[in-house]
Amino acid sequence: MTDYRSPADSTRIRGPQSQDHAEERPVSHATPPDDPQMAEALDWLMLEDDMDAATRQRFEAWHAASEGNARAYQRVRDAWQSPLLTTAAARLEQRLAAPPRRRPLWKPIATAAVLVLAVGAALQSDLLLRLRADHLTAVGERQNLNLADGSRVLLNTDTALSSRIDEQQRVAHLYRGEAYFDVAHDRNRPFEVEAGPVQVTVRGTAFAVRYLGNEAEVSVQRGEVDLRTPLDDAHISLGAGDSIRVGPQGFGERQHSAEGQAQLAWVKGRMVFENCPLSQVLAELRRYYPGWIVNTNERLANVSVTGNWRLDDPLGVARSLAQIASAQLHEYPKLLVLD
């Protein structure tokens, strides 16, 4: 499985050092390496309430040194004041009150701030999608739809879909996410689903389409479906138990499972993995958790995971994964840190 949202790992963040102070300081890997001004601005923001006179003087000199520094600092402040972080900041404030405990908490707080910056850009590009879609689900939400032709659709978490049903056609567009279609049979009007690199055509069957990033995946529960790639007009047919991934390079290898347990488990409200690396499991779990999940320990990425969990309890899944990986899970509002 793949994921469209994979927050970067982070390390401890301290305040910026001037050239007159040659101390080493850890680099924030949570901040994009090609934007040093943003990295410095975020470090200064973490120190804002703890500056002594000398540190304040250094900050003011840095802030006044260029318009770029001033803009970067305003941007991270705006992110910190975003509604996405209001709850987290309020609840963490009490924990930050004691100085000895302040620095260990900088890492998750800074990570959250950086993620909000990334999310802000994504939300702007997301506006067009929201205008095009008829149906949207939030993170962790599933929604049942009854279409005009009698077909039924189940939308999975963070999904955007539009449909048009009339006397001539039955067409659905999956812009993002995952949907399960139980299509009413109609020999005169095929049902079509367009999802990025693939077009699915059926007359009456049950199947799921997943479209994340630039890759789609089709899994058939019942009946037969015809697939076509618009780019090169390649065709393939799938039967019950078949699944296939389709990317920019065309069709992948057809897979077959008698029950299609893993691909269609979400339809029954479950999340199923068998001998999957933890990195892949976390990528999928992020789709259902209404916040951020960050792994700061690279050794955990390849830990093998087998399990069957409820989709409506992502926090419980994260706690279970921490036990499986012999790791620690630090829980904050809207933020889980695994190390």
Image (cartoon, rainbow, N blue to C red):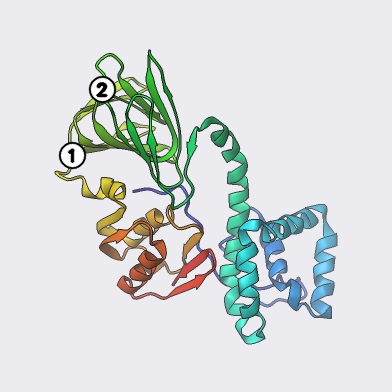
Q: For numbered disc 2, what is the local secondary structure?
A: loop
Which residue is pictured at 36% across the width and 37% down the height? 216
Q: Characterize the local packing of mark 2: few (<14), some (14-19) or many (20 or more) Cα atoms within 10 angstroms.
A: some
State the residue in front, 18 or 323: 323
Name the residue carrying label 1.
241
**What amino acid type is highlighted by mark number 2?**
Arg
Name the residue carrying label 2.
203
State the residue in front, 276 or 206: 206
From the viewer's perspective, is 104 left or right of 208?
Answer: right
Q: For numbered disc 1, what is the local secondary structure?
A: loop
Q: Indicate which label's residue lies in the foreground, 2 or 1.
A: 2
State the residue in front, 89 or 199: 89
Q: Is residue 25 visible?
A: no
Quadrant hosting residue 271? bottom left
**What amino acid type is highlighted by mark number 1?**
Gly
Q: Is residue 187 above or below residue 85?
A: above
Quadrant hosting residue 319? bottom left
Which residue is pictured at 57% across the width and 64% down the height? 111
Q: Position of residue 223 (x, y in %)?
A: 19, 30
